[in-house]
Each structure stands twice: as structure tokens, then as C-alpha cells.
Image (tube, helix red, strand yellow):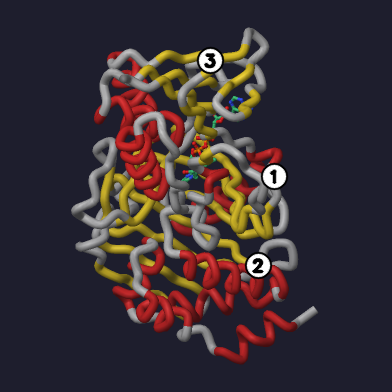
Amino acid sequence: MAQSIGIRGAGVAGMSLAREILRSSPHCAVHLFDKRPRLPHPQRTFCFFAPAEESLPVQPYKRWENVRFRGQHFDRSIATESTPYALVRGDDFFDSTLGELEERGARFSWECGHADIQGNSIRTGVGVYEFDKAIDASFEVSEARSLLWQSFGGVWIQTETDCFDPSTALLMDLLPSVESCPVAFVYVLPISTREALVEHTTFSSRQMPSEWHLSACHEWIRSHVHGDCTVIAREAGLIPMGLERSVAIENIVIGSAGGAIRASTGYAFLNIQRQARDLARALVEGGGGDVPRIHDGLPSWYATADALFLKALAKAPLKGSLLMGRLLDKAPAQPLIRFLAGDANIVEALRVMSSVPKMMMMRALVSV
Ligand SMILES: Cc1cc2nc3c(=O)[nH]c(=O)nc-3n(C[C@H](O)[C@H](O)[C@H](O)COP(=O)(O)OP(=O)(O)OC[C@H]3O[C@@H](n4cnc5c(N)ncnc54)[C@H](O)[C@@H]3O)c2cc1C
């Protein structure tokens, strides 16, 4: 018999899960609840390292096969043919996924207010809806608690003359650390010789004002881009790094609240796609029975390595740029890329971590 599945939250996780369920079991009745309106879509640009063979929900707008990291004392480029860096435009993902879900008959309750989920029922201001399974795919950043935050603001710019090398993504132009921001960098993703996303990002103990990020972007543009340029769009955001998770969750949770955010990088999009595929398979194969808990998308030792690194940054903020710089400058190239992508094995991860001088890391961890 076809199951009924209720999903609280129609963001990336909720929609990806609904898409996977309806693709493998078209007769399921899927109903999504979200407090936001159907449009506009959340303003997002999703970037991540994706193995070339990874199946993605939408064609990336751009892929880079070279990435570059630089700081005060180093400048390093790494070829990434087997794990290119990809950019998916939020509008492309949301338009195509929403279109497919509506075509496949998913039901939506947009602007439903704060939906409560309990057991297999979802309660909104309008009523209580009962399902065979209710899944929690909701996330509210203002209610989250985290050790550090990835806070960012950026601009899409178009220049009048050729200014960028579109074959290379500059993932970190490291800036000096300050007490409130152990790590600060500018990130430049060129789409063509004349168009790029320039973003200023910090790992900080609190959210930094978006105007401050934007003015840092403009300062970087003034000193690195010659000639006139036009700002065509802006974006800003906040991602928890080291999210504190509730211990008493009764429902199956997927997405940001379900551990999909990689603590040390803030990448979540690809983990969410993997979680959605795993959970949909378990739901469809499990029928109405118990569904095994899905994993976070990463082996648990990743969480330990990430937690150690973030703790060192939080404890010794002024050493942040030095720690990060040593890691990016000295770690072996391909293990570093696989580590950032979340695909390194434990031996590769240890080789990457050991590029940070142990004394520096220990001092950072024990400093008050
Ligand atoms: C600006 C920005 C840029 C990002 N860029 C990247 C990137 O480059 N690469 C990457 O890998 N990750 C990135 N991320 C992180 C992550 O991929 C995204 O946040 C992604 O949207 C997370 O998906 P989600 O479904 O968990 O949360 P969301 O997409 O935020 O969806 C959660 C949904 O739950 C709804 N909701 C919350 N509470 C309730 C409730 N009580 N009742 C009903 N609905 C509720 C919300 O309205 C929301 O629509 C970015 C995040 C932001 C904010």
C-alpha cells in the first residue's frame, strides 16, 4: 500500500527528500509544510567539492578544476580534476525541484506558521495532519546554538575589462585574525573573465553585520580589480560550525538540524543530497515499518577532527590565520582536497591534520 509521508520544512533537505521518495515510489502521498511562502526562493548559492561521478540534482552553473589558497606567506594552486569545485545556483535548484515535485503531485502547505511535529502528526494553525511517517527537515538558524559561525556577505560583480581567470576558484585569500574572528578570508569565484562572486567570510563567535562583510568585499575589489565594475547581486548568510544538537529527538531529522553541516567548512548541500537518497530508500523499502536512523553523511571521526580544529580556533583566535595558513600551505595536495570534500580516508585525514605543527595546536587547545 502507498505510504503517506509528512515533511516539516521545504528547504533543500525537505524538497530533496520529497523528490527522492517520489522518484522511487510515485504512489506515495507526500505533503510538505513550511512557514515561508512558495516564492521567492531562499537566496542561496551552493558551492562544494563534488567527485566527478557524483549524481547532482541539477547541472552546476560552473565547475572549476583548479583551486587556489593564499595568505601572507604562501600562494598555492591545486588541480582538482577528479573532485572539481562546483557552484549550483539556488534558483536553479529550487525552480527545478519545486517544478518536479508539483508535477509528481506533492502537496504543499506554504506559510503554515510554526508547524509542530509529534510522532507521526504535524500540527499547524489550520489543523492536525496524520501520516504513516513524519520527517523533520526544518531548520531555523536564529534558534541554533553553535561553537563558531561562518558569517559571510558577498557581491556578484561584472567588470568592464578582463580581470579574472575563470579556470581557477580562489577559495581563500586569508586575512589576519582578530579576537572576534579567528579566520577571515575573501573568496572569489570567477564565472568568466569579467564576472565573479566575491565574498568576505569569517569564522567568528557571533554573526558579523552584513554591511561590514560587504564593505570588506569592496575594499578587496578596490585593491585587486582594476577599472570599473558593477554590482549585479548581493548575498549574505550565516552557517553554524559545530551545531549543538538536541539529544532528545523523537523524529527522524534530516538536513542542517540532522547533522548535515560539515562543522569545519560549513558545506552541507552535498551531504543533504546523500542523506535524502539514503532516507528515501529506507522509507520506501521499509514500507510502514521502522526506519533506521540515517547517518550524518560523514564518518564520525570527521566530527572529532573538526571539533578539535574548531576548538583550537575558538580558544586561540589570534592564531587562527596561522593555523589555517599552515594547513592550506603544507598539507599534501590531493588528500587536502579530499579532506575538504569530506571524502578522505582516516590515513589521508591524519596526513592533512599533521601539517599543522602539533605544538601550535596543543598551545591553542590549552590556552585560556
Ligand atoms: C546564504 C547561505 C549560503 C550557503 N551556501 C552553501 C554552500 O555554498 N555550500 C553548501 O554546501 N552549503 C551552503 N549553505 C548551507 C546549507 O547548504 C543551506 O543552508 C541549506 O539550505 C540547508 O538546507 P536545510 O533544508 O537544512 O535548511 P533550509 O534550506 O534553511 O530549510 C529549512 C526550512 O525549514 C523551514 N522551517 C523552519 N522551522 C519551521 C517550522 N517550525 N515550521 C515550518 N517550517 C519551518 C524554514 O522556513 C526553511 O524553509 C548555505 C547556507 C546559507 C544560509
Tell me the kind of residue under disc 2: Pro
Residue type at mark 1 is Pro
Q: Residue at x 27, y 26 (%)?
A: 25
Q: Earlier in the sequence, mark 1 or mark 3?
A: 3
Q: Residue at x 44, y 75 (%)?
A: 328
Residue 159 spot, x, y in % from top left: 37, 42
Determine crowd level at label 3: few under 14, some 14-19, many 20+ residues with C-alpha closer than 10 A.
some
User: Which residue position is annotated with label 1?
Assistant: 209
For the point 53% across and 15% down, which residue is it? 110
What distance separates the C-alpha of mark 1 from that of mark 3? Answer: 29 Å
Total label count?
Answer: 3
Q: Relative to 130, does residue 44 appear above or below in the rendering?
A: below
Mark 2 Cα-neighbour bin, 10 Å: few <14, some 14–19, many ≥20: many
- Secondary structure beneath dot 1 equals loop
Q: Nearer the viewer, mark 3 or mark 2?
A: 3
Q: Is mark 1 within 8 Å of ligand 1?
A: no
Residue at 48%, 31% (x, y): give it.
Answer: 11
**Quarter occupied by the N terminus:** top left
**What is the crowding at mark 1: few (fewer than 14 residues within 10 Å), some, or many (at least 20)?**
few
Instruction: Establish if 136 lies above or below 347.
Output: above
- Mark on residue 110? 3
